[in-house]
Image (cartoon, rainbow, N blue to C red):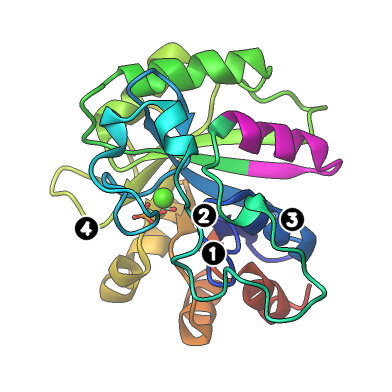
Amino acid sequence: MGGPLVFAHRGSSYDLPEHTLAAYLRALDEGADGLECDVRLTRDGHLVCVHDRRLDRTSNGRGRVSVRTLAELESLDFGSWHPRAVPADGDEVLDDSRTRLLTLERLLDAVRAAGRPVRLLIETKHPSRYGAHVERRLVELLHRYGLHRPAPDDPVQVTVMSFSPLAVRRIRTFAPALPTVLLLEVLPRWLRPGRLPFGTRVAGPGIALVRARPGLVPALRAAGNQVYVWTVNEPADLDLVLAAGVDGVITDRPALALARLGR
Ligand code: G3P
Ligand code: CA
């Protein structure tokens, strides 16, 4: 296979409500190499796939995710806000896979059940009132699934990402063999493209940063790092990152990216 890996950002989240099981299953159907998800801890210690600190944008709930129990979050609708949540024709069934909260456990079960290689990028969201507990619980859960380190014969491969260098360091401490990505919205003054911190070998710059700093991707790659760029949704941006030779494209529209790659 030529070209970069294609990761579905929050699932096929252009077409279906982000972080729902339906959005992830659609991405797998479309042929995405991998899936991206954000995780947060509930008040009772469960990892749930929700991007925002607050519930307001993506559910019919209000307030912070971190002060709710799993049972409370399970009672909310996480899908109806999306313009394409309701099927346009009778062929598709409207079930709770488009509206139900997705726990990381359920996502791991779905990925395991896919029956084909899947790369899972799990982003721990910070700041969090639970601090290091987020990474601790994540590594505990990955241990239960045997995914805390890469196994060559396992079709499921997990990589943990964060904008927080401290979170990346914690993953390195709790699960030294687990690959990590340091996400970059801007270029920190301390960052040297040749020396990513804490054993990270993958940089995750945003598309705006890649546009603003045309030398960044070549410098990172020349130093032996891989580069995964987010969130690449527009054809012109796809062309830009393909020309730059990135290793991974994180997109809300995996089908579009795959078509552009001729796959
Ligand atoms: O894949 C990285 C990207 O998801 C980071 O930004 O805000 O979408 O989590 P955000
Ligand atoms: Ca993310």
Secondary structure at badge 3 equals helix
Q: Residue furthest left?
A: 189
Residue 118 covered by magenta stretch:
yes
Secondary structure at badge 4 equals loop
Q: Which mark is residue 186?
A: 4
**Magenta span dominant secondary structure:** helix
Q: Nearer the viewer, mark 3 or mark 4?
A: 3
Q: Is residue 131 left or right of residue 223?
A: left
Residue contact at pointers 4 and 1, CB within 8 angstroms = no
Residue contact at pointers 3 and 4, CB within 8 angstroms = no
Residue contact at pointers 4 and 2, CB within 8 angstroms = no
Image quadrant in which the N terminus is located: bottom right
Q: Which mark is residue 10?
A: 2
Q: Is residue 189 left or right of residue 164?
A: left
Secondary structure at badge 1 equals loop
Which quadrant of the render holds ligand 1?
Answer: bottom left
Q: Check disc 3 and report the residue beneath it.
A: 28
Q: Amino acid at mark 4?
A: Val
Secondary structure at badge 2 equals loop
The CA distance from mark 2 to mark 1 is 6 Å
